[in-house]
Amino acid sequence: MAQSATSVDALVAPTSRAQHTTLDIVSRLSSLSLPDDSDMVAIPLHHGAHCDSLARLTDEILVSILEILPKHDLCSVSRLNKRYHALADAVLYNTVQWLKPELHLIFSQSLNRRPRRGSAIEGVKLAYPASELTRLISDTLEPTNSVSHTISTMSNLKTLDIAVPVGLLHSIGNLFNGPFDLACLQSCTLFYQDEADQYWDLQENIHIFTHPTLETLVIKRAKLDDRGFELIERPHNTALSKLHLIECDINDDALSDVLMFPEALKEFVLTQREEPEPELEESSASIRDYILSLKEQCHSLETITIDFPMLASARPLALREFTALKTLRLNWDYQLFGKSTKKPRLHSVGLPPELETLEFFNPLGTDEEVTDLFVSALENMHYTCRKLKELIVLVDEDPVPKEIVDAVKKQEQLYLNLSLKDTEDVLVISQQALNIPLDQKMECVAERGKEMFGYKPAGAVKQTDKDARPDTTEFFNVSKDHLLGNSESRSYPAEITDQWTDLGRFAQNCHSLGLMILRILAQQLDLPSDEFTKRNKISSVSGDHIRMTKMPGCDSADGKRIGLASHTDFGSITVLFNWVGGLQIQSHNPTKQGEWAFVKPLSGHAIINLGDAMVKFSNGRLKSGKHRVVPLPGVQGRVDRYSLVHFVRPADDVLMQPVEQYRNEPVVAVGGKVGEEKVYTAGECLDCQIVESIDNLVDEQIKE
C-alpha cells in the first residue's frame, strides 16, 4: 500500500473554490494512477498526464459508482467516452416511467434510432388515464398499438407495471400471446382502466400465466370467465410464486386452470369489496370453491389471503392437504368453520398441519354454533393445529367472545393479537396537522381555563417542577363527540377536518378496545362484565378524545429538557401508539419506589394505561400509572417523536364514586386532584382539572 496517500473523499471535499462538479470529479479520478502490486489501493491527489485508471475497473463497479450520481451529472459523464456512454445508459434507462402517452411515443422513436438502449431497461411503468389516450388519438396519427413492440425490445426487462386505458388491452396482450420476448421478466402488474369502471377482460392477457420466468403477478379489477385456456395446452412449469387478484371477478374453474402452471406458488391473495361494483358475474359465492381451486398448489402455498366478505359456505374448509401453509387470512370465522344451518353437521374443519398464524378481518362471534366449534378447535390444538402461534382478530364494538379468550389462555404458545386498523394512516394525518405553520395552529388554540379540545403549544412549565423546565411537546386534542356528531364541534385545521371520517373510525376502534379491556378487568374483579363499560358508552357526551403529539428532536442531550411533565391520566383507559422511545413510567415496586423506567415501543402494539377513574371506581384496587416523556440520548433523540393517544373517559353525567360493591368501604383518594368533600360527576371533575391544569402551568412566550 502506498504510504503518502489520501482518501477518495478528499477529491470531493469542499474547497475555497466553487464545489467540484461531477464531471470534474470523474475526470480527476480518470487521471489517477493505480499501483499494480498493492492489495489496497490508495489514490494520491496530483495532476499528471491523463491516464484513464478507471478503465481498469469492471463494468459492474463503474455502474455502481455511476448509480450514485445525480441524473444531470450522469448525462455529463456519458459524454466522456464511448464506454462511459454505454454504462451511463445502463443507469439512466434502468427504470422508465411513462405518465403520458406522448412520452411513450417519443421514447419509442428514440429506441428506433438507438435500439441497444432497450437492453438497458429493467423496469417500466405505464400509468395514464383514458382521457390522455383519447386526446392523443384525436391529436396525432401515430398508432397507439406500437406499445407492445416498444416493450418487446427491452430484452432485460424485469419489472412491468401497467395502469393504462382499456383501449391498450389487446396491444399489450400481444406481448404474452406469442413467443416470449421478455425472457427476464420477474414482476408484472396489470390494470386496464375503464371509464365506466367496468372489469377488464383477462382473457386478452391470459397467457401471462404461462410466462416461464415471471415470479410475481398482480392483477387489478379484471374478470375471467370459465373458458380459461381455449386451446388444449400441455401445462409447463413456471416460476410464479406470488399471485394477487385485487378486486377481480374470477371464475373458480378458470382459476384452477391457471394454477396448473406454477411449479411452486407460495403466496395467494384474493380481494373484493364488501359491496362490489359492478355486480359480480363470474365469481362463485362459496369460499370452498376457491379453496378447491388452490389445491393445485397445496404442496407449496405458504400464505393464503382471501379478503372477500361476500363468500360463505355451509361446510367447513378442508385444508389438511395444504402441508406448507403457515399463514391463513379470512374475513369471517364462519368462512373457515361453515355457516350454521338447520341440517346436522357431518364434517369438521381440517386445519393445515403447519399453520402458525390465523387472522380474521371481521369480528368473531356472529354465529354461536361457529363460536362453539372455534373453541373446540382451540382446545384441541395439540391434535388439530399444534404449531399455531398467533390468532389475529379485529377489535370491534362487540368484544371477542369470552369463550374464545378463555380457550386461548389455556394454550401457552398461542398469542391473541387484537388488530387496530388504520393506525399508520392516522399517524400521517397527525404529522400533517402538527407541521402546519404555528400561526395557523394558534388559530385553533384551546382557550385557557375553559376547554381541553384544540391546540396546545409547547413551552408550558409545571409549577411543581423545581427545575421550572418548559415542556417541548405540542399537541391537538380532537374530541370524540365532535368527530361522531354527539356535540357541536369547535374549529380544527383543515388537515384534521378533511380526514374527519378516518379519525372518527379510529376513535371508535380505540374506544372498542378500551371497552374490551374494561370487561376483562370487571370479570377479574368478580364484577358484572358491564360494570365499567356502562359508565363509558361511546354515544354519551364525555371527555373522550384523540391526542396527536409532537416532540421535536434535539441534536444535543440536555438534562433539563422535558417532553411532557409527569402526571397520571384522568379517565378510564388510555390507548397509546408511539414509534420512538421517550415514555417513562414510575415504579410502584416498594424496592424501586419513585424510580423511572423507559417503556419500549413495539411495532404493531399499543401501550395501555389505566386512568384515575378506574382507581375511583375500584376504590384503589386498580392503579393509574404516573408517567412522563423525556428526550432520548443518541440517535433517537434527534428524531421528531410523534404519538397517537386515545383517552376513554366516563360519560360527563357519571358519578365519580366506587361501584356499589365497594361503596361501604373507606374511600381511597385519587391523587389529590379533586377534593373528596362531595361526589363529583366526571364532567365536573374535568372542569376542575382544566382550571387546575391552567393554574399549575405557566406558558413561556411563544415565538415564531
Image (spheres, grey):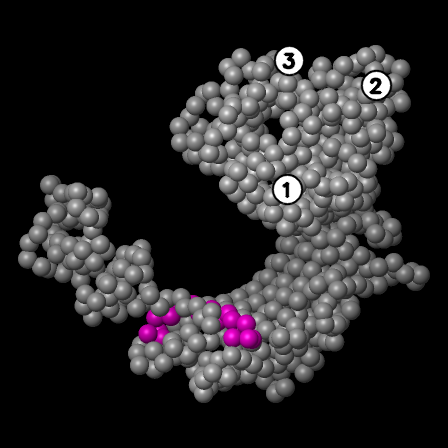
Confirm whether the magenta stretch covers residue 235: no
Residue 440, how many percent across, how many down?
Answer: 55, 40
Q: Amino acid at mark 3?
A: Pro
Q: Residue at x 18, y 68 (%)?
A: 81
Q: Residue at x 56, y 46 (%)?
A: 428
Residue 40, how many percent across, how many down?
Answer: 19, 47
Circle 3 residues within 10 Å: few <14, some 14–19, many ≥20:
few
Give me the C-alpha separation between circle 2 and circle 3: 31 Å
Residue 359, how many percent across, how many down?
Answer: 69, 51
The mark nearer the N terminus, 2 or 1, is 1
Q: Nearer the viewer, mark 2 or mark 1?
A: 1
Q: Amino acid at mark 2?
A: Val
Magenta residues span: 117-132
Give me the C-alpha separation between circle 3 and circle 1: 44 Å
Q: Amino acid at mark 1?
A: Tyr
Circle 2 residues within 10 Å: few <14, some 14–19, many ≥20:
few
The mark nearer the N terminus, 2 or 3, is 3
Give me the C-alpha separation between circle 2 and circle 1: 34 Å
> Where residue 492 is drawn, which disc sits there?
1
Vertical placement of residue 88 versus 5, above or below: below
The mark nearer the N terminus, 3 or 1, is 1
Q: Residue at x 24, y 66 (%)?
A: 78
Secondary structure under badge 3? helix
Circle 1 residues within 10 Å: few <14, some 14–19, many ≥20:
many
Residue 588, how many percent across, how many down?
Answer: 65, 18
Q: Which residue is identified by label 3?
A: 590
| Quarter of the N terminus within the rendering | top left
Q: Are marks 2 and 1 in contact (CB under 8 Å)?
A: no
